[in-house]
Every structure is written in C-alpha cells, then in structure tokens.
Image: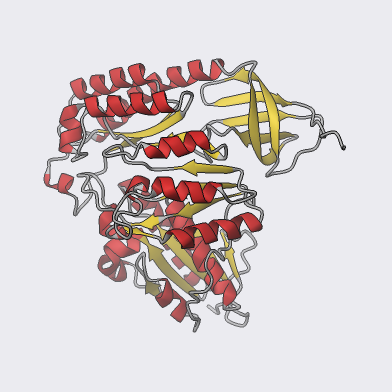
C-alpha cells in the first residue's frame, strides 16, 4: 500500500512516562524545528508521516503501554499511513536488542542520550546553541526544567540508572539561562525535576548546590513560582529550606519520595535511611517551614514485605499526615538488585495493600482539605472547562495533586493568578469563588 511519501516530512512525537521524558521530547522538537523540519507533539490532526515514540521502561505497566503504542504506530505504517516509525527513550535504551528482533518494522531504535543520532535520520545537525529553545508540550504558563540527568543511588527496586546512567549535573549558568528564556516566552511556573534533586552539583562543584541554584533562579524577574520535585531524604541539604522560606516565589512544596517506613523494607530497598531518621528530617522540615506541603510516593509489595510492614507504613502515614501521597505496587525489574530476590507477594495482594494505604491517605487528604474551607488562596488558572476554571494553589503540582474548581464573574485566562475563597472541599479537589480583581490606585 502506498505511503504518504508525496508530502514534505512532518514529525509527530508521542511521549510516554515521566516529566523528564517530556522535556527530552520538547528538546528534540526544538532541534527539529530549528532544522526546518515540521514537528508536533501528540498531533491530533494526523497530518504527519513520521512518528517518534519516546518510551518509558520504568515498571511493567509502563513497558506494556510503550510496547502497545509502538505496535499501534507500526500498524499505521503497514496500512500506508506512515512512512517511518522511530523509537527512543528508556524502553529502547534498556531492551533495544530484543526489541529490534521482536518488532523489526521499526525503522530505528535510539537510547536516552542519542538525540544527535535521531537528528541524523533527518539529515539535521544538533545545534548546541539552542539552549532552552524547546517546543513546549505543556500549556504556555508552566514548564518542567531538568537540572541533572541519571542517578548514583542504588535503590534495589529502581532501574533508572540502567536507562539514564550516572548522575550528571547541568551547569548552573545553563539552567539559569534556560529558565530566563522560558520566562521570556511566558512561563510563570517552573518545576525543577531530576532523578535526585538534592544531589545537584556534587559532580561538578564538589558540593550540594541546590540552595545556590534556587537563589539564582528566584532572582529571575517574572518567574512567579518555582517548584521542587524528587528530593531524596538521605543527607537532605536543610539550607534549601532556608532559601525556600526567604524567597516568595519558591513554592512551599516539596516532593520527597520515601518509598516505605518499615526499617526492614527500607534496608531491603537499600534506601540508606531509617524510619527514625526520616521522622527527624520531616520534623526539621516542618519546623523550618511551617505550613509546607509535603508530597511522597510509596511502594508496596517489595519482596519479603509482610502485613506487619504494611501496618507500620499505615501508622507512619497517620502520624506524619502528608498532604499528598502516591502509591506504586512493586515491579520486579531485571538488572536491579531486587530482581535477585523472590517476588513473593502476589499481584492481587500488592493491589490490596496499595488500596489499604490509599484509604488511609484519602481520609487524611479529606480532613486537610476541609481545613481550607473559608480560606483564601492564590490560584494559578490552568484551563477553562465547561464554563468553569481549573487551577492550582502553590501546594499543588500538575496532574498529581489537588485541582481547584474556580467560579468567576470575570473572565480569566490560563496563566492568570487570582485570589480564590474556598467554598467546598473533597478528598482530592477543592471548589472556590474568585474574588474581584482590585486595580491598584493610580497615583
């Protein structure tokens, strides 16, 4: 069947997985566009003839989704709707040899650090001078900013180092310049991401430099919110909290994946910390920054986990009362040290334990949200939907946290900041009314 080769090439990039993958796709899009190659992200018009699938290989469900997406694009190629299908990202990095054999219809496979090789397929050059020139896949008012690549940790469950390599910090001046470019393009909120934020700078500056980086970023005019994602608890640099408290545009929000609270499990997971040390750290964080929003993620079903371990975790949640909690069931991943252990918790039991944990957190979240009724929060409007507006407070990140449903008598736009009085609260969402915008008196 004849393919769509009579048209000028247009590329569609499909991104799966985490925000770090999304940034990679944005950078690739920017490079293609700079080489005068039409490109779109998650193209809805279906007027492209080349697809690049940026895959995730983190856990089993993500791998299955990536493979399914690849197969769907290969089928479109067989039908003549596509000329080329390329695959990049974590799954390709990790399983390239096997995938080349199993899905030979894919035209080329690339790893996580092979952007220049992808560009070669388009007779395009990698342009180093395009710092920050990304084609944003997010709404215009917020963006993710990757400050490092890879990870030096040896957590027993995690395959990230296999796919992303060792920790490599991005030079501070490059990060600041990229942030400045994003703000010039209308970005008001920047979410700092890395596999491990607090490790930033150790490789190139020989000390932890996250606090210094935050100071420089917070000095950028027009940058309204800076948000921190993925901080490791072991050797957490407390000076980061001082900067967070002193600078108004650094959100009082910290995403710190803890994974578990049982000492048995923390040791088995090779987390290099104990429950007591975690509790002391959480106390120090809250003492330095009262009112901080703490988000964590947890894993249940790791080999050897017992119901007693789950009870310890539930008790820990009740005592610590996190604002936000995400939960994963353990995925037995080749190449990790955990893979050497017997995956002895049945899948149904993993799911049941995850449900137990979320029921505990659901009640905590509901109680915390109820406390917000009647209070006024600054809300960033993300979108308009069905005659209402959806936004977030500084205590809520994109997609994973609360949304605020805002009713307003005056027109609002995505990217607007508005004062909202909370009128209703649910387990994971809030409702509120936008207060009238008061124009400053002209002197």
Left or right: 390 in relation to 130: right
Which of the 4 image quadrants contains residue 32? Answer: bottom right
Q: Residue furthest front?
A: 443
Q: Residue furthest right?
A: 443
* Residue drawn 60% across the image and 48% down it: 223
* Residue drawn 43% across the image and 43% down it: 229
The C terminus appears in which quarter of the rendering? top right
Question: Relative to 168, does residue 380 appear above or below in the rendering?
Answer: above
Q: Which scheme is used to colour this image of the protein? A: secondary structure
Question: Relative to 411, does residue 202 appear above or below in the rendering?
Answer: below
Left or right: 304 in relation to 365: left
Q: 198 or 443: which is nearer to us?
A: 443
* Residue drawn 54% across the image and 46% down it: 218
Q: 87 or 246: which is nearer to us?
A: 246
Percent position (x, y) of residue 170? 40, 60
Percent position (x, y) of residue 69? 44, 58
Determine if residue 136 is in view: no
Percent position (x, y) of residue 398? 53, 41
Percent position (x, y) of residue 178? 53, 60
Question: Relative to 298, does residue 57 appear above or below in the rendering?
Answer: below
Q: 113 or 348: which is nearer to us?
A: 113
Determine if residue 314 is in view: yes
């Amino acid at each position: 069947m004849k393919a769509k080769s009579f048209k000028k090439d247009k590329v569609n990039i499909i991104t799966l997985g985490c925000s770090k993958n999304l940034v990679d796709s944005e950078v690739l899009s920017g490079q293609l566009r700079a080489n005068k190659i039409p490109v779109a992200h998650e193209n809805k018009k279906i007027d492209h003839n080349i697809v690049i699938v940026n895959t995730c290989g983190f856990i089993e469900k993500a791998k299955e989704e990536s493979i399914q997406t690849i197969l769907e694009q290969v089928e479109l190629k067989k039908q003549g709707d596509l000329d080329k299908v390329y695959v990049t990202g974590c799954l390709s990095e990790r399983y390239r040899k096997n995938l080349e054999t199993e899905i030979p219809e894919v035209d080329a496979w690339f790893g996580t650090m092979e952007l220049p090789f992808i560009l070669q397929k388009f007779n395009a050059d990698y342009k180093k001078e395009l710092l920050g020139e990304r084609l944003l896949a997010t709404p215009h008012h917020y963006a993710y900013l990757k400050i490092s690549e890879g990870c030096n940790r040896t957590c027993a469950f995690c395959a990230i180092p296999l796919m992303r390599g060792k920790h490599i910090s991005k030079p501070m001046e490059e990060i600041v310049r990229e942030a400045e470019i994003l703000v010039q393009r209308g970005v008001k909120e920047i979410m700092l991401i890395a596999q491990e934020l607090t490790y930033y700078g150790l490789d190139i500056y020989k000390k932890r430099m996250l606090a210094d980086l935050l100071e420089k970023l917070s000095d950028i005019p027009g940058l309204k919110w800076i948000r921190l994602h993925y901080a490791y608890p072991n050797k957490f640099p407390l000076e980061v909290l001082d900067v967070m408290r002193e600078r108004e545009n650094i959100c009082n929000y910290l995403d710190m994946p803890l994974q578990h609270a049982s000492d048995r499990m923390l040791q088995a997971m090779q987390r290099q910390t104990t429950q007591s040390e975690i509790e002391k750290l959480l106390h120090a964080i809250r003492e330095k920054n009262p009112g901080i929003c703490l988000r964590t993620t947890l894993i249940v079903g790791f080999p050897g986990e017992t119901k007693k371990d789950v009870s310890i975790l539930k008790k820990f949640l009740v005592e610590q009362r996190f604002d936000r909690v995400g939960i994963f069931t353990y995925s037995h991943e080749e190449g990790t040290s955990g893979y050497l252990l017997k995956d002895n918790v049945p899948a149904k039991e993993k799911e049941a334990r995850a449900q137990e944990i979320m029921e505990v957190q659901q009640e905590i979240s509901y109680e915390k949200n109820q406390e917000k009724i009647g209070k006024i929060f600054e809300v960033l409007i993300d979108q308009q939907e069905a005659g209402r507006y959806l936004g977030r407070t500084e205590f809520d990140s994109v997609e994973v946290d609360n949304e605020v449903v805002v009713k307003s008598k005056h027109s609002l736009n995505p990217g607007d900041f508005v004062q909202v009085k909370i009128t209703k609260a649910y387990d994971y969402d809030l409702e509120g009314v936008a207060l009238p915008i008061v124009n400053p008196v002209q002197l």
